[in-house]
């Protein structure tokens, strides 16, 4: 045995696990396929790393078992994340909606911190080491990896698989965890890109090309959930935080509803304006709520150059429908190249929620994005990865 545990994947979960194991005096070896650890942390939040969310609870996670994450989040709370980073000089600043970023540092500072702590605890990180096989025999895990054209096998009684999800294959994302789970008879919940832009094709494409470049505060909803944030119209479809959020709840073939003016009633506004000054143009009224370029783009669909007093009943209904009941049927999503996370993954029913140990394979732990626990946009996914890392470290 070369260490108390082998951790496959030096991402958010694997690194936190190694550090927490270090606090407990346990030695681990991290095997990382990439040339450096924490690659996704480095690009997260536009290089600034939205490392947690002040309001994170198990409620903002999608999973076949929505109670599964509760235990991990009780063991490692948002306050724990904040104080962990704070202890090492990374204090948080809320950007919006509880999203916490390093106040005067960036994502690199977070990765550097993990590197320093791993070095202090003597946790060995082997980069450019892609794990290709695992054999489990007599309570020992033999892990085979390729490095510099050579093959190595190391053994441990405890093994952590923290190889992440499928997004951004060009950064080295693999389906290793899913393949290994499947091979060993563990159930997988269907996977799909999540927190991903949605595409539009066909007749509607013209609409979006017209509106391309506009970012509008909206309420986006389907029959499960609604989000109030900005959406971004592009020449191929829809993006922006509200769209990324709803994409995690969207299935191909379904429509989504967009309310382009969630806190007002356009019909009431028009009627009030008619009383005050019927000569006001619809465009003038719209410009009070939208950027001029959005109103201009809408001129193709709405009678923006008409005075509000002269709008017919049919036009009033059209305006109401367009502003409040804008229904879109996306053709698809932008796929794993553009997704921030993967929905689905290893079925949580295969694991103990308290320890994240695999029920059928003692000594084996899964953590982070490879599990069927998917957070909202806004720091939730890192909170899950840190929590998994902490919980697993207690068990190994
Ligand atoms: C562009 C982008 C921005 C994001 N921004 C945020 C954000 O601001 N806030 C937030 O909360 N979340 C964000 N996320 C999501 C977040 O990055 C992930 O949820 C998180 O990194 C998952 O942690 P993990 O440890 O499970 O996996 P990862 O961090 O992906 O780590 C897995 C590691 O395993 C390695 N690996 C894979 N297969 C093998 C193998 N066979 N052998 C050895 N190593 C292997 C990979 O190279 C990788 O380094 C973002 C994601 C993307 C793509």
Image (cartoon, helix red, strand yellow):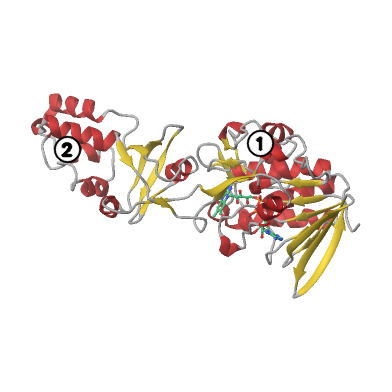
In percent of width and height, residue 306 lies at 11, 39
Nearer to us in this view, 89 or 17: 17
Q: How many marks?
A: 2
**Is there any visible trace of residue 2 in the rendered image?**
yes
User: Within 10 angstroms of label 2, few (less than 14), some, or many (20 or more) residues?
Assistant: many
User: Within 10 angstroms of label 1, few (less than 14), some, or many (20 or more) residues?
Assistant: many
Nearer to us in this view, 284 or 56: 56
* Residue 127 figure quarter: bottom right
Q: Which residue is mark 1?
A: 78
The answer to which of marks 2 and 1 sits earlier in the sequence is 1
Q: Which residue is mark 2?
A: 282
The residues tagged by marks 2 and 1 sit, at their Cα atoms, a distance apart of 47 Å
Say which residue appears at 82% left-offset and 41% top-offset: 394
Give the structural element (helix, strand or loop) at label 1: helix
**Is there any visible trace of residue 28 in the rendered image?**
no
In percent of width and height, residue 38 lies at 67, 57
Say which residue appears at 77% left-offset and 38% top-offset: 355
In percent of width and height, residue 231 lies at 38, 45
Q: Is residue 26 left or right of residue 90?
A: right
Quarter occupied by the N terminus = bottom right
Give the structural element (helix, strand or loop) at label 2: helix
Which mark is on residue 189? none
Q: Is residue 335 left or right of residue 366?
A: left
Say which residue appears at 77% left-offset and 56% top-offset: 116
Label 1 CB less than 8 angstroms from ligand 1:
no
Nearer to us in this view, 271 or 131: 131
Nearer to us in this view, 155 or 86: 155
Circles 2 and 1, Cβ within 8 Å, touching? The answer is no
Quarter occupied by the C terminus = top right
Looking at the image, the residue that sits furthest to the bottom is 149
In percent of width and height, residue 240 lies at 42, 47
């Amino acid at each position: 045995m070369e260490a108390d545990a082998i951790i496959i994947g030096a991402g958010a979960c694997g690194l936190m696990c190694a550090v927490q194991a270090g606090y407990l005096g346990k030695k681990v070896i991290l095997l990382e396929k990439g040339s450096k650890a924490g690659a996704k942390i480095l690009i997260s939040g536009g290089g600034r790393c939205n490392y947690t969310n002040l309001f994170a609870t198990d409620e903002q996670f999608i999973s076949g078992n929505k109670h599964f994450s509760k235990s991990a989040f009780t063991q490692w709370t948002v306050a724990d994340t904040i104080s962990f980073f704070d202890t090492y000089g990374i204090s948080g600043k809320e950007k919006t909606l509880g999203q916490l970023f390093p106040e005067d540092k960036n994502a690199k500072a977070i990765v550097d911190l993990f590197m320093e702590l791993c070095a202090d605890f003597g946790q060995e990180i082997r980069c450019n080491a892609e794990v290709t096989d695992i054999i489990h025999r007599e309570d020992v895990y033999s892990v085979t990896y390729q490095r510099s054209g050579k093959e190595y096998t190391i053994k441990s009684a405890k093994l952590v698989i923290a190889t992440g999800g499928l997004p951004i294959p060009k950064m080295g994302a693999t389906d290793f965890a899913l393949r290994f789970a499947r091979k060993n008879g563990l159930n997988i919940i269907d996977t799909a890109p999540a927190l991903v832009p949605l595409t539009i094709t066909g007749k509607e494409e013209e609409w979006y090309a017209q509106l391309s470049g506009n970012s509008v505060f909206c309420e986006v909803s389907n029959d499960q959930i609604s989000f109030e944030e900005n959406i971004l119209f592009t020449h191929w479809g829809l993006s922006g935080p509200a769209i990324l959020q709803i994409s995690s709840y969207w299935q191909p073939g379904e429509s989504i509803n967009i309310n382009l003016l969630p806190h007002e009633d356009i019909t009431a506004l028009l009627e009030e304006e008619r009383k005050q000054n019927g000569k006001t143009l619809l465009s003038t009224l719209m410009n009070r709520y939208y950027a001029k370029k959005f109103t201009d783009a809408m001129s193709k669909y709405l009678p923006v150059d008409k005075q509000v007093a002269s709008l017919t009943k049919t036009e009033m209904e059209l305006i109401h429908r367009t502003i409040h009941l804008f229904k879109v049927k996306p053709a698809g999503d932008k796929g794993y190249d553009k997704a921030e996370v993967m929905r689905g993954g290893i079925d949580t029913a295969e694991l103990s929620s308290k320890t994240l140990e695999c029920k059928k394979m003692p000594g084996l732990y899964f953590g982070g994005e490879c599990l069927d626990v998917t957070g909202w946009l806004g720091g939730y996914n890192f909170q899950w990865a840190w929590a998994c890392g902490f919980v697993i470290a207690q068990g190994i």
